[in-house]
Structure formats: structure tokens, C-alpha cells
Image (cartoon, rainbow, N blue to C red):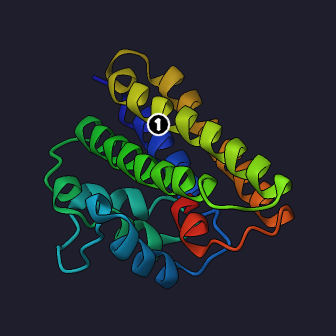
Amino acid sequence: MVPPNQLCLVLVIFLSILSLSSLPTSAIILKANVSFPKANISLSVPSSQLVENLCNGKAVQNRKFCLKALSTPEVIAAMDTTQLGTVIMKLGAANAKATLNLYNEMIKKPGSPQALKALNMCVEAYKYAILSFEMVSSELVEDPETANYDVAVIGPEIANCEKELINAKVQAPRLLAGNR
């Protein structure tokens, strides 16, 4: 079993990545419910003690967002930190897949060469993120340090994607919401 402190570090890094977006949390949740049906955030489900403990951690910068993002029935049903981490990584992979689909839709629309370059860069970042999220699920049990690294490198990739979108003046709030 993964030592709880290592798993908490992996989960805190993942949640920190989620909170790096420049969009307000309420806009993200609204867009997530519309754009990402597999990742609906239900605010009516009470948080489990595991989620409460995680979101109350010192490294979590946005406790309110943490609680909202982790208020799905699947997350609440987790019985231990390893199961919680696995469910969170699967949720991350599902969100990344939904966002990748949005990027692939945008690429098909006419736009500037700079916008196309930014969108293609984001597609690659999301392919990488999906693979990382999926690998972490098994690594949590086998090799928590590798899982920690794999989660940590997702954030900068997505941040670079967002920066490229802004520099290319791509007007796509749904994409920015997906980055969240």
C-alpha cells in the first residue's frame, strides 16, 4: 500500500494543477457541466472525510474548488487514499479526453496559422496528459514517486498550452475551461 503522505503529495500536486487556471471557478463549473458531461460536478453530494482531509491540506491553495471538484459520487465512495487517488486520476483522464475532443473540433475550423499551431501544441499536451493520468492509476500502488512525477509534469504542459492560446489570440472559453 502507498504511504499516505506520498499519496497525499500526488493528490495535492494534481489539485494544484487544477487550480492554476485564470478563469473563475464558477465559470469553470458551469462550462464543465455543459461541455464535459462525463465530468459533471455535483455539489449536492456531501464530501467524505478523505476528501475533507485532502482539501484541508496546507498545500491546497483553493479549498473551495478542491471540494467542488471532488464532490462526485465516485470520489466520495473511495474507501482509502489509494482508491481516492485512482478515482481522481480517472476523473482527470476523462476531463482531458473531453478537452482533447474540443481541441480536435477547433482544429477543423478555419483560423490563423498561429492559432492552428497553438491548437496543435495543445492537442499534443492533452495526449500526454491523458497518458500520464492513466499511468498514475497503476503507479500509485507500484511506484508512488513515479506517480508523483507523472502528475507534476502535467501542469506545466497545460500551462504552456494555455499560454500559446492566449498568445495566438484564440477566443475559446470552452478550451480554457477544459484546461482548468
- Callout 1: SS: helix
Quick one: quadrant of the C terminus? Answer: bottom right
- Apparent side of residue 47 relative to residue 18 in the rendered image (left or right): left
Q: Where residue 133 appears, x then y in whole percent?
A: 44, 35
Residue 103 visible somewhere in the drawing:
yes
Q: Quick one: label 1, few (<14), some, or many (20+) residues within 10 Å?
A: many
How far across and how far down the image is residue 155, in percent? 64, 46
**140 or 129, nearer to the observer:** 129
| Mark 1, residue position | 130
- Residue in the image at 49% along x and 75% along y: 28
Position of residue 54 in the picture relative to residue 87 (left or right):
right
Q: Position of residue 3 (x, y in %)?
A: 37, 28
* Residue at 62 percent of width and 76 percent of height: 23
Which residue in the rendered view is the most extreme toward the front?
110
* Screen quadrant of the N terminus: top left
Residue nearer the viewer, 172 or 91: 172
Q: Which quadrant would residue 152 be assigned to in this image?
A: top right
Residue at position x 33%, y 74% in the image: 33
